[in-house]
Amino acid sequence: MRIIFMGTDIFAVPALKAIAGSSLELVAVITQPDRPKGRKLKLTPSPVKKSAQNLSLEVYQPEKVSDKTFINEVLKPIKPDIIVVAAYGQILSSEIIHMPPIGCINIHPSLLPKLRGAAPIQRAIINGDKETGVTIMFLDEGEDTGDIIIQDRTPINLSDTAEDLFIRLSELGSQMLMKVLDMAQKQILPRYPQDDTKATHAPRLTKEVGRIDWNKSSIDIHNLIRGTIPWPGAYTNFNEKLRVKIWESWPVSDLSSTSGSPGIIVDIVSDKGIIVSTGQDELLLKTIQPPNKAKMDFKDFVNGYRVKIGDMFI
């Protein structure tokens, strides 16, 4: 069974390593071209390319994978039996989707048809979901609409950040993929059509998504904070002028005996954090990052910026 692997983001690396470490025939890795990154805009290879090179695998980096020349000169001569896709970042043409006899399969980090789209991990946390999971599915021409092969679930803990969940789901996805590839070799791949009436969507995050609305409940704001880690981060203005990011919080309802308008600091608990009133209950802020500064413990923020009860985040 000849396999082509298509992936770019670090989410795809555990799956790539799992295939490469097996007895399966991984004939090519396709990833996005090197992109400029950092202040110096240095061309940087994708995590998948770095991993593939370390494994001495054949790597291709087409600007557009569905370009006719690339399909005719590279993909067709390889004659893949199956194409595995994970966090690749390009839409595949119908010609590619229908090229391998077994099909193109995709690792998607949600329980489809829930959270179709570019940011299912982050949106699951922001939405306050109690669980999520991984779906391995056949690709079709729609956005995450193909038939489901298998799914597995994992709980979302109140302390999980998007970064935590990202790691957990990437490992889960790689384990599930190996089961699916074994099923494919045995020619027993099931297909379960999705129920489109139950579909929800997970659009790509923008910087604006991270803006905190203190009129929302403490749990909603806490979900936003952990769901936007590491990017774009949840941010707010302190005393109108200073834009800060909040990196660690906890929803509370019993630490302060006072209450105030949403965004008002109602207490500063020396061994716990800054307590801020919200639209419902309070939010304990533990780690804060001022502009052009490193993340800091709330005590350093309080001392450095002379924070006092009655100050306000807006």
Image (spheres, rainbow, N blue to C red):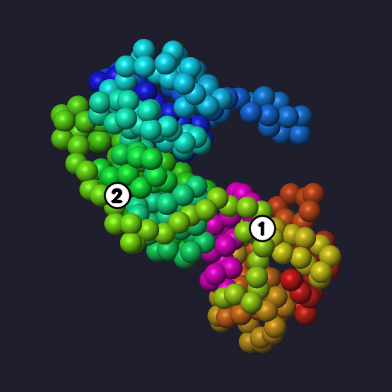
Name the side, left or right, on which 197 lies relative to 294.
Answer: left
Q: Residue at x 39, y 51 (%)?
A: 110
Q: What residue type is labelled 1?
A: Glu
Q: Which of marks 2 and 1 is nearer the N terminus?
A: 2
- Helix, strand or loop at label 1? It is helix
- Helix, strand or loop at label 2? It is strand
Image location of residue 180, percent across then percent down = 25, 35
Q: Per the image, is 124 magenta?
A: no
All told, the count of numbered labels is: 2
Magenta span of residues: 218-234
- Please say if 224 is above or below 121: below
Task: Name the residue beneath numbered marker 2.
Answer: 152
Q: Residue at x 42, y 46 (%)?
A: 143
Res. 189 image quadrant: top left
- Please say if 8 is above or below 268: above
Res. 314 image quadrant: bottom right
- Please say if 235 is above or below 280: above
